[in-house]
Amino acid sequence: MAALLLSCVCRAQKVKIDGIYYELRTTSSTAYVTYEGRDEKGLYVNSYTGDIVIPPTIEEKGVLYKVTDIGKGAFANTKTLKTVKLPGNLKSIEAEAFGNCEGLTSISIPMSVTSIGNLAFYKCVNLESVHFDDVASYLYLGQGAFYGCSALKEIKLPKASGMLHVIQPMTFAECRQLTTFIAQNRVDVEEKAFQNCTSLQHAGISKMGTIASNAFEGCTALDEEDKTELQSRIQDERVREIVKASYKDKKEMTKLMTKLMTKPPRPFMVDKKAEIDHIVYGIDLQKKE
C-alpha cells in the first residue's frame, strides 16, 4: 500500500496553464510541455495556432515549477502553429516534439538545450530558419531530428565548449533546399546524415572528423572542394580488406591503394529507398508510447 501511494505521489500531473499543457514533476518542482491528447489511432492531437511563448516558470496551486523540457509529441501534427519561443532554461526537446508541424516557420534554440531528440522536427515542411545560440556546452542531435524539413536553407551549429558534436543518422536527410551547413567545431558525421540534400553546396567537410561513406549520399550539388575532400576522407574498408588479403607484398599494396584513393570521385546517386513517409530507421512518428 505504501509503495502504491508513493507511486501516485511521484507520477507527473497534467495541467493546462494559459492554453499550454504541462506535466508537473512534483518531486523536483520542474515541468515539461506535453501534448494535448491522442485520437482513436493513437496519433498526437494538438490545437495550437499562431505564435506561442513558453515561459521559464509556471505556477500551480502556489508552487513554482521550472519548465525544463519540451516533451514527446508536445506540438506534433499542428497545422497552423507558426513560431514557438523557448525559455532560456530549457534543457531538452524530446522525440517528435514538433513532428509534422506544417505551419512552423522558425525556431530559436537557446544555449541551455543539450539534447534534440529523434524526429524532433520531422517533416516541418515550412521550417525556413533554425537559429542556435552561438555557444553551447554540448548539443546532441537525434536521428532524423530535421528529416524532411524541405524549406530549411542553412544550418549553423553552435560553438561547443565541451564535447564534440555528432551528426546522427539521417539528421538532415531530405532537406532538399539546404544549401549551407556550418559547424564551428569538429563534427563526426554518421550514416545518411545528409542524404538527398540535393541543394547542399558547402558543408565544410575539411573541418569534419569521421564521415560515414554514405553520409552525403544524393548530395549532387556539392562544390568541387567538398567533393574532393569527401572522396579523400571516406575509406572503403571492404576494398582495404580485399587488398590486404590479395597482396602480401607491401610495395604492391601501397601502389594499388594510392591508385584507388586518387581515382576521380564516383557520381553521387540518389537512394530511392530514402523516399519514406512516416518511418525513419524504425522510428514511427505515429507509434503509441
Image (spheres, rainbow, N blue to C red):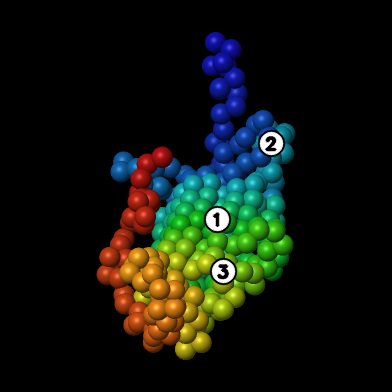
Q: Residue at x 47, y 54 (%)?
A: 118
Residue 181 versus residue 11 in the image, above or below: below
Residue 86 versus residue 266 in the image, above or below: above
Can you give x and y, in whole percent of width and height, for residue 105 in the image?
50, 69
- Mark nearer the N terminus (3 vs 1): 1
Q: Residue furthest bottom?
A: 224
- Mark nearer the N terminus (2 vs 1): 2
Query: For the N terminus, which image quadrant?
Result: top right
Can you give x and y, in whole percent of width and height, for residue 51 in the image?
56, 62
Disc 1 target residue: 116
Disc 2 target residue: 29
Q: Residue at x 60, y 72 (%)?
A: 183
- Mark nearer the N terminus (2 vs 3): 2
Q: Distance between the Cα atoms at labels 3 and 1? A: 21 Å
Q: Residue furthest front?
A: 249
Disc number for residue 19: none
Hey, which quadrant is residue 59 in on the image?
top right
